[in-house]
Amino acid sequence: MQLYASNKRKIMISGLLFVGMILSFFDRVAINVGIIPIAEEFHLTTSQTGILISIFFVSYSLMQPLGGWMTDKYGARVMVTVSLFSWSLFTVMTGFAWSFMSLLFIRFLFGLGEGPFYPASMSTIRDNFPEEERGRANSFFLSAQNIGGILGTALAASMVVAFGWRGMFTIAGILGILASFGIWFILKPQGNQKVKKDKPKQKKVALKLLFKIENIWKLITFKFISNIINYGLITWMPIYLVKEKGVDLIAAGGLLAIPYIFGFLMFNVSGWLLDKHMANREKYLAAAGALLSAIFLFLMSNATSIALIITYLTLNSVALSFFGTVLYTIIIKYSPKELTGSASGLVTFAGQIAGAVSPLALGLIISLFNDSYNAAFLFLVILALLGTIVAVSIKNNQAQPAKEYEKTTTIV
């Protein structure tokens, strides 16, 4: 029988993973602020600037499935620590870049380093929290994305002014390295969690078993759809507010922080709902979130004032918070323990591909329809409705170890 961490230790683990996720989003978002002085110093063209921002998503997405597999093979403690340490080291190195090519190479390595963190964190939650607490633990961890997003813009800008872009990356990287040491020691098995000395090394995981999980393609599809919507809004809403609605750029930045704040709160509320009231019914919360997202996106596209636009955008952020929480909670609750990391990595990989595709797709739609943002919003509404259908079709069942389904099909 598996014994989980004590309450005190679970709080420490949750806190460190939360900090790790904040640093993750801060480091990847801060480049959007730092790129302004970077472009001036290295005399970058517009295309070079775009490549520099995008290169992270290329290496990060490629590392998702491999990072998940490495987590299942080497263990969550090793991969969480290695990931946080390595991407933090590359963050420090960013501050010492001497040319465009050196910066491009470092940012590529940064994406590779950060890749395993997400799936390894999912496995860490599964290893240390009983099933009835995993929804809250997962949602608290994921809610750190919103804090990282806010700090990656507001705080990063202040740090650039105070310390320069090199100083900003150096400070952020040092904090991450210190956090990695904390995670390594906190995740060390203690007391009743210690493994037997004669326990064999963690066995290799056959990746082909992932595709015997019946719902894996539904989870991948749902993640892809949700990230098309999420990244589409992140990319185009600032431009929409400034160019289409005439909002001042600084004011737009402040207004767009509001959905992050409410998203953070609702991530944690949805985790509580999952654990207390939605056991074996998680998919219905996902479906409700997708349906509400479609409604709020439609209302936002027809809003007649800035106040209404931000209101519906905030409500949509609340609805979207159900997407990620439910998705990964289903994985860590019901997927076989041996494949939790791999499943998380594969699903996250699909989400990052969507992140790269979404801005391009919406830009193309806006151009094809004579600069009509309503066409882009309608596209997102249709995707949200499709997500509702996919969510309802997901089947839930109790988790089984990998050995029990090597010759069968298992439901996640």
Image: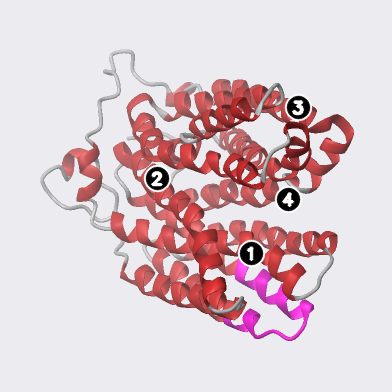
Residue 179 quadrant: top right
What range of the chain is rendered magenta?
A: 298-317
For the residues labelled 3 and 1, the Cα–Cα distance comes to: 30 Å
- Secondary structure at badge 3 equals helix
* Residue that badge 3 annotates: 171
For the residues labelled 4 and 1, the Cα–Cα distance comes to: 17 Å
1 or 2: tag closer to the N-terminus: 1
Q: Horizontal placement of 366 versus 399: left or right?
A: right
* Residue that badge 2 annotates: 344
For the residues labelled 4 and 2, the Cα–Cα distance comes to: 25 Å
Q: Quadrant of the C terminus?
A: bottom left
Identified by mark 4, the residue type is: Ile
- Secondary structure at badge 4 equals helix
* Residue that badge 1 annotates: 236
Q: Horizontal placement of 407 versus 335: left or right?
A: left
Q: Position of residue 391 (x, y in %)?
A: 38, 68
Q: Position of residue 337 (x, y in %)?
A: 32, 40
